Amino acid sequence: MKKSILLLIAAVFLLLSGCGQTVYQTNDVTAYDKAFLVGNWHADLDSDLSLFPDELPAAAESVTYSALLKVNLFDIDATIILDCVLDEETFDSEIARLSGLSKVIRDRGETYTNRVIYDETSYRAPAYITIDGFGNTYEYALLDRAGHEITYLYLSYPYPDTFPYPDYLKRDLSVYEEENTLHAWSMYNHSFDGDRTWVEFDD
């Protein structure tokens, strides 16, 4: 009996010791590959990263990129940040793409269309938002119209005290302490039964 308990404790320890393990990390702009991220982790991200461009804009004047994904017991913590300074024409074209984003969610013959949100007050810059706290995740693009700059972000479980880019976070940092996040919004999810259950875009 004692041996069985010890084996069980050892198994739990080994399982937990793998939590928080980095599974993917890069700061290399040439490694930007949206299809790779979605193909490997879309189920954990609960997103197909619609907000992010499929490829780096050819006319980008400046680009920085970083991605960090860590395995947890039940999900993945992820920080994906892409910053692009564009020429005016490419910037306007990208704004047009962002403003038209939507996702159709289907469940047993019913359909519902969620559309991207444009928000000028929650962040320190105007933002297009596709996830706003649902499941402790955030997906949004911050706009600098004067500088033709767009910063795309996907954050899960951001901790304001340690996040290295505080200007990218919401003005009201208390929202990141919210525990009941299934009542937050995501373009990729919808409830057809009054918030009892949620259907994802790819269910």
Image (cartoon, rainbow, N blue to C red):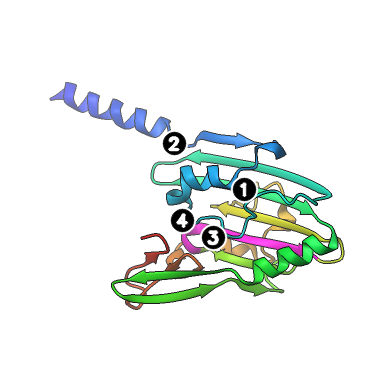
* The residue stretch that appears in magenta: 134-144
Q: Position of residue 141 (x, y in %)?
A: 67, 61
The amino acid marked with disc number 4 is Asp
Q: Quadrant of residue 148?
A: bottom right
Q: Does the magenta segment cover residue 136?
A: yes
Mark 4 in CB contact with mark 3 (< 8 angstroms): no
User: Residue beneath label 4, please?
Assistant: 46
Quarter of the figure with residue 128:
bottom right
Q: Earlier in the sequence, mark 2 or mark 1?
A: 2
Give the alpha-carbon distance from disc 2 to disc 1, as whole Å.
19 Å
Q: Secondary structure at mark 4?
A: loop
User: Mark 3 or mark 4, which is nearer the start of the sequence?
Assistant: 4
How far apart in space, not on screen, are marks 4 and 3 (Cα)? 20 Å
Residue 139: within the magenta?
yes
Residue 102 is left or right of residue 53, and the answer is left
Furthest residue in direction right, as rendered: 146
Indicate the quadrant where residue 36 lies: top right
Earlier-in-chain disc, 1 versus 3? 1
Residue topped by disc 3:
177
Badge 1 element:
strand
| Secondary structure character of the magenta stretch overall | strand
Q: Is residue 124 visible?
A: no
Q: Identify the disc placed on residue 80.
A: 1
Kind of residue indicated by mark 2: Cys
- Residues at circles 1 and 4 in contact by the CB criterion of under 8 Å: no
